[in-house]
Image: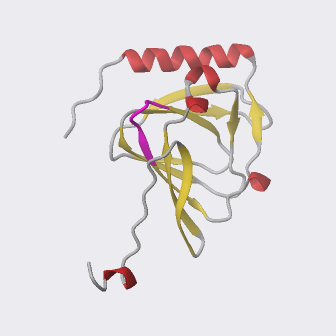
Amino acid sequence: MSGVENLLEIRRHDGPSYKPLVDFGAWRVAILNFSEDLLPENLTRMQRHNETDEVFVLLAGRCILVVGEGTDTVTRMHAVPLEPGGVYNVKQAVWHTHTLSPDAKVLVVENRDTTYDNSPFVPLNEIQRREVMEMVAALWAEPRPPAD
């Protein structure tokens, strides 16, 4: 690949959790991989981004995205299994979290200035935590959609 290094930047992330890979202008591309804190029983809070949408694309494995209604707290939750290659845009200020299978790899596209300062968290109470675990268990039990 002589000379291509000046033309093409190649980044990978195979370790656990989230890692930004490319920042350019106003946007960022990151990879989210499985980590223990993303197991359903370890989900204790949801996050929202007050200034931007956030896009998720399932590249491998399984991921369930949990989105929540409500302004100051989560009042109702919905679990959505991501399908490989689908583009899932979580709208600005929507509470969300996710759980991944150990082999999962999720592409994340977001604004480069998405930080903890403009992305608050809200705790899940015990009833909500049980609800998340039940929704995820039901979806994990469903067969995977056939690959195209």
Above or below residue 16? Residue 131 is above
Above or below residue 118? Residue 122 is above
For the N terminus, the quadrant is bottom left
Above or below residue 112? Residue 8 is below
Q: x%, y% of residue 120?
A: 77, 45
Q: Is residue 4 left or right of residue 139?
A: left
- Outermost residue on the left side: it is 148
Q: Is residue 54 left or right of residue 45?
A: left
Residue at the spot 61% in from the left edge and 26% down from the top edge: 77
Q: Splitting the image into 4 quarters, where does residue 53 fall?
A: bottom right
Above or below residue 12? Residue 141 is above
Q: How many marks can you see?
A: 0
Residue at the spot 22% in from the left edge and 31% down from the top edge: 146
For the C terminus, the quadrant is top left
Q: Is residue 114 magenta?
A: no
Q: x%, y% of residue 13?
A: 46, 53
Q: x%, y% of residue 72?
A: 80, 36
Judging from the image, the colouring scheme is secondary structure
Q: x%, y% of residue 42?
A: 63, 24
Q: Which residues are magenta?
A: 100-106
Residue at the spot 71% in from the left edge and 56% down from the top edge: 115
Q: Splitting the image into 4 quarters, where does residue 124 fall?
A: top right
